[in-house]
Amino acid sequence: MRQIIVIACLLAVACTLSFKVVKTPSLDKKDKLSEYGFFSGKMADLAPAGGVVPYSLNTPLFSNYAEKLRFVRIPEGTKVTYTADGALEFPVGTILIKNFYYPNDFRNPKKGRRIIETRLLVRQENEWVAWPYIWNEEQTDAVYDVAGETRQISYVDIHGKKVVTNYVIPNKNQCKGCHNKNQSMQPIGPSAMELNRNQQYASKAENQLEHWQKIGMVDNLPYLKDIPKLAVWNDPSTGTLDQRARAYLDVNCGHCHRKEGPANTSGLFLNVGETQPAVLGVMKAPIAAGRGSGDRSYDIVPGKPEESILVYRMESTDPGVAMPELGREQVHKEGVELIKEWIRNMK
């Protein structure tokens, strides 16, 4: 019995040591991304340093076909708390790190990539703040820049077509537009239902939430079967057409179009928790869409995507019409087709 207890203690220590927490970092903004020590070796490799944990989402926000690499760092002696409603509460000092990049050729990642920007979301004592960084042409570092800018990018897409387009890096104030919940800045992506998926780590692939629990990074985690899981919008094996369409709308639209969001006056709520058809836009007339309605009468007309305002705005690139308003200079053709199919199948 004594040997069993000793072995159990050693295993617990080993699991804890696998996550190298960092001391509570200074919450002062740095001029260069490299000064935070997030990455080891060559900066452009984005290889996480000790205490920096990679994560991914079931259904991520569409951002002009940019790929993203996400990481999180929490201070030593702290944990993320899983709450009764399935939310995650991050401790003061947490930094969420989101890197936006384009592969030179989407068909072959080995041909390299170009990192455009890194956005930090920092949990300070009383609020979250956004610190945007823009990468240099040499891909050696990124510098803090509140003004944003527009860059021309080029890449070969998954179909072998060369794409040349503008990529708009938002300014710091625009970050608040999407991350606004009850008039305060909040993270959008790292929720329990988004993180309930496998992630490839150095040794093997594991469910992210279980991995966080194993390394001592999260508290109060229930059994995995009791944790909500968002469908993967383009993977039919993860959910029904309705579940996948709702997941897509939740992450791309629901952060604004919800009761706690900046688009609450529209009466159109697209977060995944809403169940009333009228609130979701079914045969709902817009309150004040203006030319954004495209001369269509209702947000969603069951069976008729071509008559639905929702589709019209998703297909537009006109800044006065397009939805979402930020981070979308290109039309997400695959996402639009999913929503069209969803509406076609409504009765």
Image (cartoon, helix red, strand yellow):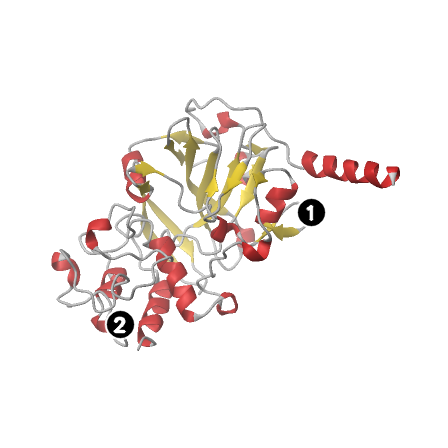
Looking at the image, residue 161 sits to the left or right of residue 297; the answer is right
Q: Who's the residue at 50% across and 57% down the image? A: 229
Q: Circle 2 is placed at which residue position? A: 305
- Left or right: 156 with respect to 81? left
The picture places residue 7, in percent across and down from the top left corner, at 82, 39
Numbered tag placed on residue 225 in the rendering: none
Residue 220: x and y in percent read 56, 42
Position of residue 201 relative to residue 157, above or below, is above
Q: Secondary structure at mark 2?
A: helix
Q: Is residue 171 visible?
A: yes
Question: Label 2: how many residues lie within 10 Å, few (<14), some (14-19) or many (20+)?
Answer: many
Amino acid type, residue under disc 2 in the picture: Pro
| Residue 3: % across, % down | 88, 38
287 lies above or below 261: below
Picture quadrant where residue 281 is located: bottom left
- Is 259 placed left or right of 102 in the picture? left
Asked if the residue at tag 2 contacts the one at tag 1, i.e. Cβ–Cβ closer than 8 Å, the answer is no
Quadrant where the C terminus is found in the figure: bottom left
Q: Residue at x 57, y 24 (%)?
A: 23
Between 13 and 83, the residue placed more toward the observer is 83
Q: Give above or below for 222 relative to 339.
A: above
Q: x%, y% of residue 338?
A: 37, 68
Left or right? Give the position of 280 relative to 217.
left
Q: Is residue 99 above or below residue 281?
A: above
The amino acid on which the numbered mark 1 sits, given as a three-letter code, is: Ser
Task: Measure the alpha-carbon separation of dots 1 and 2.
Answer: 46 Å
Among the two numbered marks 1 and 2 on one chain, the one whose residue lies closer to the N terminus: 1
Q: Label 1: which residue? A: 203
Q: Tell me the crowding category of disc 1: few under 14, some 14 to 19, or many 20 or more residues within 10 angstroms, Cα based.
A: few
SS for tag 1?
Answer: loop
Which of 65 and 57 lies nearest the eye of the viewer? Answer: 57
- In which quadrant of the rendered view does residue 77 lie? top right
